[in-house]
Structure formats: structure tokens, C-alpha cells
Amino acid sequence: MADERAPVTFRDWKERLATEPWAPAIKPQTAGDIIGFLRHCKEVHAPASIVGAKGYIAQREARVRNPEASPHAALRGSFFNGDENGGENCP
């Protein structure tokens, strides 16, 4: 298992998202969730990491009652599909 505190990159995430066979309505939400997480990392001066994503998701879910608005699916897909889609340091 990879170190959950290790920094990860989201190299070419926009291009990879564009090639996903998801419904067109899901892609803008997913892009917004990824951008939101990366913005959060920048604001708190922390690298993107699995631990950071888990904390971000928990924080967002605590504020939002609608599970459909959770960034969980977008970030989970980005981290766990990273290696096979060209991400660096993704588990």
C-alpha cells in the first residue's frame, strides 16, 4: 500500500476526463470537484495526497447534506485510476 501522505500529481487529468465514457452531465461536476480539491490544497499550502483528499471529502460532506454533491466519486476515480492513466505517484 502506498504512503497516504505522499504527494500525488494530477497530470493530464482534463484530457483523461474527456476520454471517460461517463454521461456528459457528470464530467463538469467531476472537473469542478477536482479543481476544488486542488484549490483547497493550494489555499492550505499542502500537496495533494490521499490523506488530503480524505480530509477534504469529509469536510465537504459535513457541510453538504446532499450525497450527490460530494466530491468523493471524482477524487476517488482520480487517485485510484491514476497509475493506469498516466498519473505520477498515484496508488
Image (tube, rainbow, N blue to C red):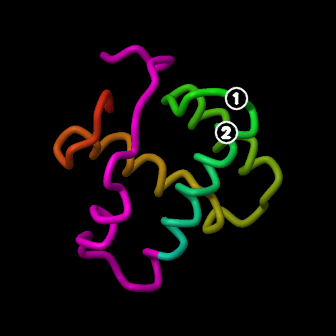
Q: Which residues are magenta?
A: 1-27
Q: Picture quarter containing residue 27? A: bottom left
Find residue 42 and name its label.
2
State the image coordinates of residue 88 (x, y, percent, origin top left).
29, 33
Which residue is outermost to the right?
63
Q: Picture quarter containing residue 51? A: top right
Find residue 27 and name its label.
none
- Name the secondary structure under disc 1: loop
In the displayed structure, would residue 91 be above or below residue 4?
below
**Structural crowding at the residue carrying mark 1, measured as other residues with C-alpha within 10 Å and reported as few (<14), some (14–19) or many (≥20):** few
Q: Amino acid at mark 2?
A: Lys
Q: Amino acid at mark 1?
A: His
Residue hosting label 1: 45
Q: CA distance from mark 1 to mark 2?
A: 5 Å
Dominant secondary structure of the residues highlighted in magenta in the image: loop
Looking at the image, which residue is at 47% across and 57% down?
Answer: 74
Which residue is outermost to the left?
84
Q: Picture quarter containing residue 21? A: bottom left
State the image coordinates of residue 53 (x, y, percent, origin top left).
57, 37
In the displayed structure, would residue 35 be above or below residue 41?
below
